Amino acid sequence: MSLFGLGSKNQRTFRPKKNAPSGNKGVQLKKHIDATLGSGNLRDAVRLPPGEDLNEWLAVNTVDFFNQVNILHGTLMEFCTPNTCPTMSAGSKFEYRWADGVQIKKPIEVSAPKYVEYLMDWIEVQLDDESIFPQKLGTPFPQNFQEVVKTIFKRLFRVYAHIYHSHFQKIVSLKEEAHLNTCFKHFTLFTWEFKLIDKAELAPLIDLIESIVSVC
């Protein structure tokens, strides 16, 4: 059974897939993403379509990347457990602690699966908040919208960093590395295009990232 197949026994652990924002051209932009991804050119797929609003583009892609990372990690839950991954790390040099500034104000050390659970819960709250991600046509985005998006992408990157450092050999043994690499390439090109993650945050995978952006 494919590690990333939705028919796996882990399917019951997946969160419901989030839909693109329904208002403000969200559906049309999602169709544009799907069409350009189908062309195979990821560099073209991440670019802001001519005449479109940047915040609209960021919003619909944020939902897409949330869904991607959610599925990727969800299929690894058998291997990423509190016993195998007692801390949320990316190699020996990078460890991430969780805080959301509301319920958990002081960063706490948690296992990798618990960190991802907290993260996905937190992102869902942001996506469901219509004052941040508007659903109705004509509703403006908040002034801090891009900062919220940057925080979401910074934290989603940490999931990729953990997967590559802690679970890549397992993925290779299951012959699923091509799918993971394609997902991360798409994620990297998008975040690079719109400068969503500070370079210092990218340190755990910087060699891989630089190879992606230099070749494309």
Image (tube, rainbow, N blue to C red):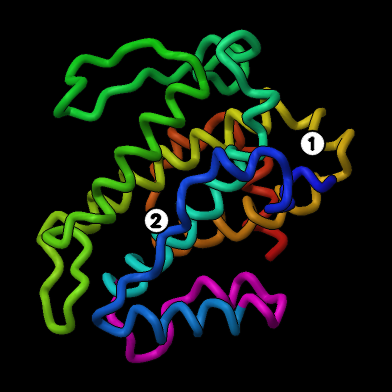
| Picture layout, residue 59 above or below residue 200 | below
Secondary structure beneath label 1: helix
| Picture layout, residue 165 above or below residue 23 | above
Q: Earlier in the sequence, mark 1 or mark 2?
A: 1
Whether 49 is among the magenta residues is yes
Q: Nearer the viewer, mark 1 or mark 2?
A: 1
- Which quadrant is home to the C terminus? bottom right
| Picture layout, residue 69 above or below residue 86 | below
Q: Position of residue 152 (x, y in %)?
A: 35, 45
Q: In screen coordinates, is 167 left or right of 19?
A: right
Q: Residue at x 13, y 83 (%)?
A: 138
Q: Position of residue 76 (x, y in %)?
A: 66, 33
* Span highlighted in magenta in the image: 37-54
Q: Nearer the viewer, residue 196 or 66?
A: 66
Whether 207 is among the magenta residues is no
Q: Which residue is mark 1?
A: 171
Q: Amino acid at mark 2?
A: Lys
Q: Residue at x 33, y 22 (%)?
A: 98
Q: Residue at x 58, y 23 (%)?
A: 90
| Picture layout, residue 188 above or below residue 13 | below
Most distant residue in the bottom direction: 51
Q: Which residue is mark 2?
A: 195
Q: Amino acid at mark 1?
A: Ile
Q: Mark 2, residues whose alpha carbon is within 10 Å: few (<14), some, or many (≥20)?
A: few
Q: Position of residue 164 (x, y in %)?
A: 68, 33
Task: Answer with the quarter of the image where residue 96 lies.
Answer: top left
Task: Answer with the quarter of the image where residue 194 lies.
Answer: bottom left
